[in-house]
Image (cartoon, rainbow, N blue to C red):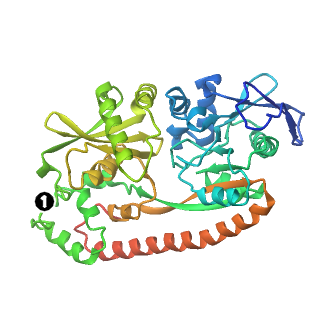
Amino acid sequence: MAAVVSYCKPPPFLGRLPRNFAGVSENQGTPKKIYLSVVSSILEVSSDDWDACAIDATGHENFNPFLTHGFLSSLEESGSAVKETGWAPCHIIAKDECENILGVVPLYLKSHSYGEFVFDHSWADAYYGYGLRYYPKFQCCVPFTPVTGPRILVRNTPLKEQVTDVIITALKDLTAKSRVSSLHITFPSETEWNKLREQGFLPRIGMQYHWKNRNYKNKMKAIDSVKLSWKTYLSICSVNFAEQAEGVLDAAEGKQFGAQSIWDPLGISTQNLTMKRLRGHEIKASHWDSFYKFYKTLLITSLWGTPYLTRDFFHNMGSKMGDQVLLVVAEEGDELVAGALNLIGGDTLYGRLWGCDPRAYYPSLHFEACYYQAIEAAIELNLNTVEAGAQGEHKIQRGYMPVTTYSCHYLMDEDFRKPIENFLVHESTQVLPNTHLHIEILVKMQTISFKASKLPFVT
């Protein structure tokens, strides 16, 4: 099977863009040609074709909203992920001889390392220290989104494996012939990560914290005599766990949990705040305007830096994605004072962004809006997982468990490849023990508390 690679509306490389190149993969069946091209905008691909690749890559049950044409096109149309912001789209499209799209890859030419959540700034510094240029580089990812999912999106056809292999070869060839420093594939699936390792990519791991649904919805339906909320369970997941476990058991017998009711362990009601979860048509333009203001103010006034997403992104994304969007809002009277953006996948609720009115301080509102409201929504929607974004060991205290994340890196300079490989090996020895330690602590915590059947939400 032959692969013929060409370019449509080539992106602005600093070096001269190669006109075409070819990779060949042998197939036992009838020889077929796979045509690969690079497009400078996702709008050059129909939403039906792109989404068909994305759904085949994940399966309906694991549908990932960030891989959709609606989300990615909103980033481009709003000016959030474009050449001017250091994200020049260079998406790879694979077609057969009949112009049927067989696969797509979200790919960007980057002039910086911001908005990736897998940090390589020290690598860039090392390159520059030796008089070499680290940027531009290729980044295969969903911009500004640390969410695991397939990156090589291929249709379910008899040629699926061959198409995947041809695309991987083309990615490596494109990196070499475009005279960029490297190619980075961040937050791929574990299956892709293993396959890319075999193809010469350097593997890297990280850690996030996800909440798992243990069939809480059905368990809550079965409870009549003991009216415990699921937040009571989460409240005992803290550093002083043994002491608080006894407090929760007392609360089950009608006593108070500390200074707050077991129905409201964070005391949100005492702040005169009303929490709402809005979806689809319930989210008005005024909600997006307020949320953007909160998001922008938070980033500008914090250590995190630049608000990459524009106001238009939220409006466009909300319009295109409909009920896949869940916006948690906090109201004080008739005024919106905070919000948390979530997207709904096939089996996962993805928490992404948060912002709050800077004119007032609301204790614990961040935890309520971002973590507990997400968990409650996942229980109601029968979703298996809540992913709450990058980093954050504090999430353990809110019931979120550590999980491993993945990335792969293909560096062209052999003199730098070996030192970075050694760095990644050393880094992995730090990440994995921490993951295992956190899991061990949580298991011990559960063993202490669940000895008493008065906490009915826990298996």
Do we see residue 108 in this rendering?
Answer: yes
Residue at the limit of the structure toward the left, as seen here: 255
**Which quarter of the figure is the N terminus placed in?**
top right
Q: Give the camera-side residue of 134 and 158.
A: 134
**Which quarter of the figure is the C terminus placed in?**
bottom left
Amino acid type of the residue tagged 1 in the rendering: Ser
Residue 261, percent from left and from top:
13, 59
Q: Is residue 274 left or right of residue 423?
A: left
- In this figure, what is the number of numbered marks? 1
What residue is rendered at 59% in x and 56% in y? 121
Q: Give the camera-side residue of 369 and 372.
A: 369
Q: Which residue is mark 1?
A: 261
What residue is rendered at 24% in x and 73% in y? 245
> Secondary structure under badge 1?
loop
Residue 457, percent from left and from top:
29, 60
Residue 32 sits in quarter: top right
Q: Is residue 450 left or right of residue 131?
A: left
Residue 312, percent from left and from top:
43, 27
Q: Is residue 290 above or below residue 351?
A: above
Q: Is residue 223 left or right of residue 415?
A: left
Q: Give the camera-side residue of 285 and 114.
A: 114
Q: Residues within 10 Å of mark 1 (few under 14, many from 20)?
A: some
Residue 300, percent from left and from top:
38, 45
Q: Is residue 153 above or below residue 286?
A: below
